[in-house]
């Protein structure tokens, strides 16, 4: 797949894909004889993984650390698991914060629904 096709498929800009490759979040992508990036299935799995993890709030630094550990092989399995567990904990905290915010918004909406209803009745 070309960079444009991968960009469309995953909703990630071509610049972001180039950046991810440059900093090592995705392995170097095979290129055609003409120098055009030619993403294979494995490359696309890395793109999808990075997009998912970024969407979950992982920092670029955490992803770089994870990829570096992954590339070192099975001896880093425990370290990778610990890194992912920490990121999971942080994500759960963000979700709890968002749920609190959602409850607060629901209360405000309920309040204003009552206020607006009484205002409309007076007219």
Image: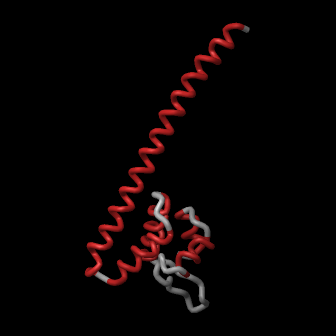
Quarter of the picture holding the C terminus: top right
x 62%, y 17%: residue: 115
Describe residue 102's horizontal placement relative to residue 91 as left or right.
Answer: right
Residue extending farthest bottom: 33
Say if 88 sits above or below 78 in the image: above
Describe residue 68's horizontal placement relative to residue 101 as left or right.
Answer: left
x 68%, y 13%: residue: 119
> Residue 13: image x %, image y %?
61, 67
> Residue 51: image x %, image y %?
49, 64
Choose top left, top right, bottom left or bottom right for residue 17. bottom right
Describe residue 15's horizontal placement relative to residue 74 as left or right.
Answer: right
x 46%, y 39%: residue: 100
> Residue 112: image x %, image y %?
61, 23
Residue extending farthest right: 123
Choose top left, top right, bottom left or bottom right for residue 36. bottom right
Total numbered badges shown on the rendered structure = 0
Say if 83 sits above or below 43 in the image: above
x 48%, y 59%: residue: 57
> Residue 50: image x %, image y %?
47, 68
Choose top left, top right, bottom left or bottom right for residue 117. top right
Q: Say which of 47 and 6 sits in front.
A: 47
Q: Coloring scheme of the render?
A: secondary structure
């Amino acid at each position: 797949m070309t960079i444009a096709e991968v960009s469309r498929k995953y909703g990630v800009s071509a610049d972001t894909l180039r950046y991810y490759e440059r900093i090592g979040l995705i392995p170097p992508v095979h290129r055609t004889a003409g120098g055009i990036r030619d993403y294979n299935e494995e490359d696309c799995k890395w793109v999808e993984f990075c997009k998912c993890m970024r969407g979950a709030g992982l920092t670029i630094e955490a992803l770089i650390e994870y990829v570096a550990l992954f590339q070192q092989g099975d001896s880093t399995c425990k370290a990778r698991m610990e890194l992912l567990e920490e990121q999971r904990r942080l994500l759960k905290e963000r979700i709890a914060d968002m749920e609190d915010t959602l409850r607060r918004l629901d209360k405000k909406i309920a309040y204003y629904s009552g206020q607006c209803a009484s205002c409309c009745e007076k007219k």
